[in-house]
Amino acid sequence: MDLCLTQHGIYELTFDIGEVVNDPFDVSVTVEFSHMNEQRRILGFYDGGTIFKVRFCPEQAGTWNYRVSSSHPRIHGIEGKFHCSECHADAGGPVRVSDKNGFILHNGERFLPIGTTCYAWAHQDSVTRQHTLNTLRQSPFNKVRMCVFPKWYPFSKDEHRYTDEPRYYPFERRSDGTWDFSRLNVDFFRRFEECVEQLLRISIQADIILFHPYDKWGFSSMSVEEDERYLRYVVARLGAYRNVWWSLANEWDFIAEKSEQHWDRLGEYLRDIDGHQRLISIHNGHKLFDYSRSWITHVSVQRRDLYLTTEEVDGLIDRYGKPVMYDEMGYEGNIPYAWGNLPPQEFVRRFWECYVRGGFGSHGETYLGVDRLLWWCHGGNLRGESVSRIQFLKQVLGELGPLRKIRLSWDDVCGGKEGEYYLFYFGNSQPLFRDIYVGEVNEYRVKIIDTWNMEIYEQDYLIKGDGRVNLPGRPYMAVLLIRRDL
């Protein structure tokens, strides 16, 4: 029997085919893993020279058997087994969808995603990447949106080298300088997977964006066959990391060469080849995708209006019956584009609005400083005022269970669990008091929350039936009612 590993770890098989073949990416390697009644079909990948690998993340403890199927006779039919021990209860495991209102870890613990966006942090130099990891380690964020392909867009330039060209590319070049989309760059993916693994070590989910439109190299306009070959490689190489989520595309409708039907077929293909069944979504530009599609596990959206943003979260939950990640509600920053120059007060308001309505959000920051490194693209250091307020929101939410939209009045923004706790958010409004009816059965403790100044004021009275809560008459206030016996 091979080595023992812990549940949710990575079991890696390495095969040497003993010869250099003309097109190693055409060599198929698949391993069937089985444990009791569970079976997983996992793709292998080429790792340079004569080496192929297979990575598997077992979710069940016990003895696993495996058998290799390959187009290369030297490794076809290899069999073996290994033992997987139980992980510590706190290890959690991969994130899954619990219901339309949230996410859950494999151990049954609730997962509250609070994301951020660093599109091209994995493409930066080692010093900047380490700064990014240090910043994330001290932040409230537990999910990072990041691209496989480099990003060509204003403010994405590598200012240290004064160039739009990244250091490494995901594909090899031919002798004439054109791209060979049939040959993936093994060294590039070794560096990229190191970033995914570094996020795992600090308990952060890697929301990997597989395609995007901000491209001058032709990566967004590959053929169907080239798209599928690329997906097979990425899934085989990265899918075993338990912190991986798949974002099939960022702003899918901005990629003119690919139709909605193309994305639908590609999404089904991604689901079918991923033996680990990681979370999958697709992110919109101007047009919402049909998130009711069976391969989509959750809704990932950005605002489609200059002003209307996270106010639509509860409607999206009802429409699609899946958790909603509002992954782009605009960015706190000062660049010229309307999506990237929100004041921190408005950005924090959108965050609170999102979570109180039952959704989940992603942060982003686009401050143009002396070093011209923007967190939204390069990572590095955070400069804005919203991060500490998001940390405060996380602390408030951590004391509650899942929030579901509750409508006690037509003009309420309220989430909670009826009969147990209610969280009201007033946003830009500045009432001096609020009359609230919570039924005649239970008494509720009252907390007034100043979401901007990050202060909580516990009141010395209880509410039952009709109750009045006095407020300071300024914006960004919230009220939390918790049943007296909780």
Image (cartoon, helix red, strand yellow):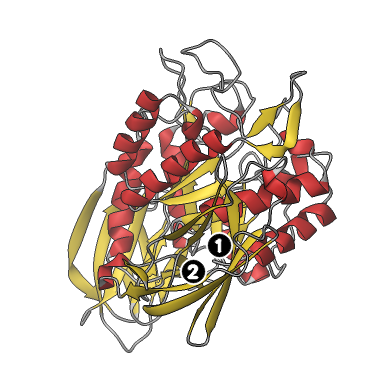
Question: 308 or 269, which is in the foreground?
Answer: 269
| Mark nearer the N terminus (2 vs 1) | 2
- Residue 33 locus on image (x, y percent): 53, 73
- Residue 331 locus on image (x, y percent): 51, 35
In this picture, residue 130 sits left or right of residue 213: left
Which residue is labeled 1 in the image? 279
Tag 1, which secondary structure? loop
In this picture, residue 418 sits left or right of residue 47: left
Instruction: In the rendered view, tell whether residue 55 sits above or below residue 369.
Output: below
Give me the residue at 26% from left, 81% from top. 443
Instruction: Say if mark 2 contacts mark 1, CB within 8 Å.
Output: yes
Give me the residue at 19% from left, 71% from top. 461
Residue type at mark 2: give it. Arg
Instruction: In the rendered view, tell whether residue 251 sits above or below residue 15.
Output: above
Q: Residue 367's quadrant in the figure? A: top left
Instruction: In the rendered view, tell whether residue 48 sits above or below residue 176.
Output: below
Residue 284 visible (yes or no): no
Residue 123 visible (yes or no): yes
Question: 99 or 83, which is in the foreground?
Answer: 83
Mark 2, residues whose alpha carbon is within 10 Å: few (<14), some, or many (≥20)?
many
| Quarter the N terminus occupies | bottom left
Question: Residue 96: which disc?
Answer: 2
- Residue 387 locus on image (x, y percent): 35, 40
Q: Residue 278's quadrant in the figure? A: bottom right
Residue type at mark 1: give it. Leu
